């Protein structure tokens, strides 16, 4: 009987040990992943990461170990959404415990947050522009990314864009930020899709590169506040002329811009005396034949195949990787500056949306005050409505200051009922004075 109990006990212990080993193995296979640029994948638990290093607990040849990886060699990091399974507490550890990460001072932490540029290497920072301008993309994320790029010695900033456009105020504020950093590093636009407002930052970059299947253009601008097609058409012409000049200054074919914004414009390609492609917006007088890139009745949306054929942009042929991008641009030795561009863009969205929502609520409150004033039958109600309007006006001014500090001073252009602060400030003061004079005893 005793021998049977002992055998049962040993069997249970063995099963627990096996379960613990299986869970330990599962913890590695189901955990985080660090993928290196050379294709190596480390699976385990990422315990620390900053702009310089990534530390992961993993297994090498069945031995638990802690790896300290140079961030420049890391292509991507995948953090598991599921909590890692753990072995039962009764199971003894099959390997010695890992050493804890020593605490560091604030100065050391700041130093660790910097990516050091190596001599003879380009340092490349990727900044994603994905979604809608003014909703998923805000200038604040770009400002933070470029500030960081300057701080750590980045040589090339690659904006990876996949956007159907959005609000022009956002794109133009972004361009202002980009121009502030001109000369600090090269700025590149890697286009997966760049439609409408996307063309503003694209033509501001030093280079434009299109991936297979990409499109670029289609940027007719409409403003809800005008309600007039002729006004919109004139506004588009102004936008087109200004952006065309900027594109030329940055080494691009400025003739493309009007065709992307104004439907009356066209682009024709012909071979010059040297056999090179040249471009014009008027086909008259072209005796040697020409090809139509975009006619006068359509808006130009440039395709990857057209960009390649006419040499209008750099093109990738195999995919859309940063490695191929660098190869096409002759960047042979380079390091990846890490994920800060992705982090900055993502973090900016929540903060900027909060300001936008508060501005919309403040404008709505102000307009309600106007309605209350117009409907007021007694001076007391009229005075209360004026006080409400004045309160919302003060909030509006503070929010405009906050928006400016967050690099989006033009956000009010997106509101059809933006408040004219100077006008309404004077109007409220004058109206209060008139009411006091009218009903003074």
Image (spheres, rainbow, N blue to C red):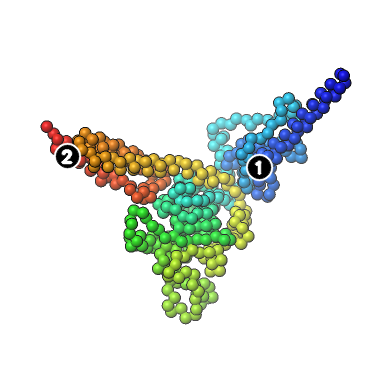
Of badges 1 and 2, nearer the viewer stands 2
Q: Relative to 175, is 16 above or below?
A: above
Identify the residue at image location x=41%, y=47%: 408
Task: For mark 1, give the secondary structure.
Answer: strand
Marker disc for residue 434: 2
Give the side of residue 79 with respect to residue 28, left or right.
left
Say which of 84 and 384 sits in front: 384
Q: Where residue 159 appears, x then y in whole percent?
A: 52, 53
Residue 135 shows in this picture: yes
**Figure label count:** 2
To which residue does mark 1 refer?
A: 33
Assess disc 1: are there few (<14), some (14-19) or many (≥20) residues with their C-alpha within 10 Å of its C-alpha.
many
Query: Residue pushed farthest bottom?
Result: 287
Q: Relative to 383, is 168 above or below?
A: below
Q: Where residue 113 appears, x then y in whole percent?
A: 56, 39
Marker disc for residue 293: none
Q: Quadrant of residue 47?
A: top right
Upstream in sequence: badge 1 or badge 2: 1
Assess disc 2: are there few (<14), some (14-19) or many (≥20) residues with their C-alpha within 10 Å of its C-alpha.
few
CB atoms at circles 1 and 2 under 8 Å apart?
no
Identify the residue at image location x=44%, y=60%: 219
The residues tagged by marks 1 and 2 sit, at their Cα atoms, a distance apart of 70 Å
Say which of 178 and 351 sits in front: 351
Q: Relative to 40, is 198 above or below?
A: below
Q: Where residue 112 appears, x then y in whole percent?
A: 58, 38
Identify the residue at image location x=30%, y=41%: 368
Say which of 242 and 119 sits in front: 242
Q: Where residue 404 appears, x then y in whole percent?
A: 38, 44
Q: Relative to 130, is 304 above or below?
A: below
Task: For mark 2, give the secondary structure.
Answer: helix
Q: Which quadrant holds the C terminus?
A: top left
Give the side of residue 231 with respect to residue 434, left or right.
right
């Amino acid at each position: 009987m005793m021998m049977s109990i002992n055998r049962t006990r040993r069997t249970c212990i063995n099963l627990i040990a096996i379960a613990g080993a299986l869970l330990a193995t599962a913890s590695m296979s189901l955990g985080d992943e660090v993928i290196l640029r050379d294709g190596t994948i480390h699976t385990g638990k990422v315990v620390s990461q900053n702009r310089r290093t990534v530390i992961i607990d993993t297994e090498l040849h069945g031995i638990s170990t802690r790896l300290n990886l140079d961030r420049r060699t890391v292509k991507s990091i995948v953090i598991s959404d599921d909590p890692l399974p753990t072995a039962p507490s009764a199971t003894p550890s099959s390997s010695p415990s890992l050493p804890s990460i020593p605490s560091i001072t604030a100065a050391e932490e700041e130093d660790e947050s910097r990516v050091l540029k190596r001599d003879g290497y380009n340092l490349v920072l990727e900044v994603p522009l994905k979604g809608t301008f003014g909703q998923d993309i805000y200038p604040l994320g770009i400002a933070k990314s470029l500030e960081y790029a300057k701080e750590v010695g980045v040589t090339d900033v690659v904006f990876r864009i996949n956007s159907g456009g959005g609000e022009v105020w956002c794109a133009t504020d972004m361009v202002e930020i980009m121009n502030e950093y001109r000369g600090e590093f090269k700025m590149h636009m890697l286009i997966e899709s760049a439609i409408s407002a996307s063309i503003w930052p694209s033509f501001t970059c030093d280079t434009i590169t299109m991936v297979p299947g990409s499109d670029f253009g289609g940027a007719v601008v409409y403003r809800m506040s005008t309600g007039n097609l002729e006004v919109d058409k004139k506004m588009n012409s102004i936008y087109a002329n200004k952006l065309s000049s900027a594109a030329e200054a940055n080494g691009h074919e400025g003739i493309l811009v009007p065709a992307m914004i104004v439907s009356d414009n066209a682009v024709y390609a012909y071979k010059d005396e040297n056999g090179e492609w040249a471009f014009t917006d008027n086909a008259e007088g072209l005796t040697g034949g020409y090809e139509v890139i975009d006619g006068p009745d359509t808006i130009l949306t440039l395709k990857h195949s057209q960009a390649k054929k006419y040499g209008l942009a750099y093109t990738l042929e195999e995919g859309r990787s940063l490695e191929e991008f660098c190869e096409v641009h002759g960047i042979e030795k380079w390091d990846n500056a890490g994920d800060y561009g992705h982090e900055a863009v993502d973090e900016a969205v929540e903060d900027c949306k909060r300001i936008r929502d508060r501005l919309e609520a403040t404008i709505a409150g102000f307009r309600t005050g106007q309605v209350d004033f117009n409907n007021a039958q007694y001076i007391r109600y009229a005075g209360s409505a004026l006080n409400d309007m004045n309160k919302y006006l003060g909030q509006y001014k503070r929010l405009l200051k906050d928006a400016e500090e967050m690099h989006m001073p033009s956000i009010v252009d997106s509101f059809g009922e933006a408040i004219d602060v100077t006008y309404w400030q004077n109007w409220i003061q004058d109206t209060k004075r008139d009411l006091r004079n009218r009903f003074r005893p």
